[in-house]
């Protein structure tokens, strides 16, 4: 896996690995329902098969239900990450 640049503030790089392209597309569609997203990029996941799909989501342009979840959730404290 190649290192990538940190996405701009409010964006997240999402990588989906699935056994089939259809499954990966279905997960990406759910994300697009909640967030504005770039066009997906699809790659072979491994020599054994599968699909790796990548896209960038913009959390500053969230749709429901993600918007209400983002508004009510706060930043994760370092102590919370370890539990």
Image (tube, rainbow, N blue to C red):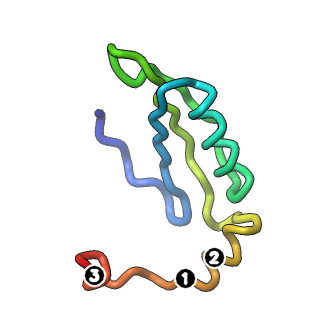
Q: Which residue is mark 2?
A: 69
Q: How far, Cα to Cα, is label 2 from label 1?
A: 6 Å
Quadrant, the C terminus: bottom left
Going from the N terminus, do you reach mark 3 or mark 1 first?
1
Q: Which residue is mark 3?
A: 78
Residue 23 in the image: x percent, y percent?
Answer: 59, 32
Going from the N terminus, do you reach mark 2 or mark 3 first?
2
Q: Are marks 3 and 1 in contact (CB under 8 Å)?
A: no
Residue 39 in the image: x percent, y percent?
Answer: 66, 36
- Residue at 76% in and 68% down: 64
Give the crowd class for mark 3: few <14, some 14-19, many >=20 residues within 10 Å.
Answer: few
Compared to residue 74, the image places residue 39 above or below, namely above
- Image check: 78 left or right of 71? left
Q: Which residue is nearer to you in this view: 77 or 59?
A: 77
Q: Secondary structure at mark 3?
A: helix
**Mark identifier at residue 73:** 1
- Residue at 29% in and 76% down: 81
- Residue at 57% in and 34% down: 24
Quadrant, the N terminus: top left
- Image check: 19 left or right of 24? left
Residue 21 in the image: x percent, y percent?
Answer: 58, 24
Give the crowd class for mark 2: few <14, some 14-19, many >=20 residues within 10 Å.
Answer: few
Q: How far, Cα to Cα, is label 2 from label 3?
A: 20 Å
Compared to residue 54, the image places residue 51 above or below, namely above
Q: How far, Cα to Cα, is label 3 from label 1?
A: 15 Å
Compared to residue 36, the image places residue 21 above or below, namely above
Q: Secondary structure at mark 1?
A: loop
Q: Are marks 2 and 1 in contact (CB under 8 Å)?
A: yes
């Amino acid at each position: 896996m190649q290192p990538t640049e940190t996405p701009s503030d409010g964006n997240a790089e999402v990588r989906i690995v699935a056994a089939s392209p259809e499954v990966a597309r279905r997960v990406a569609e759910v994300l697009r329902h909640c967030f504005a997203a770039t066009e997906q990029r699809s790659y072979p996941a491994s020599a054994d098969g599968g699909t790796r799909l990548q896209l960038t989501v913009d959390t500053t342009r969230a749709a429901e239900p993600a918007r209400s979840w983002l508004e009510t959730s706060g930043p994760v404290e370092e102590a919370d990450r370890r539990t």
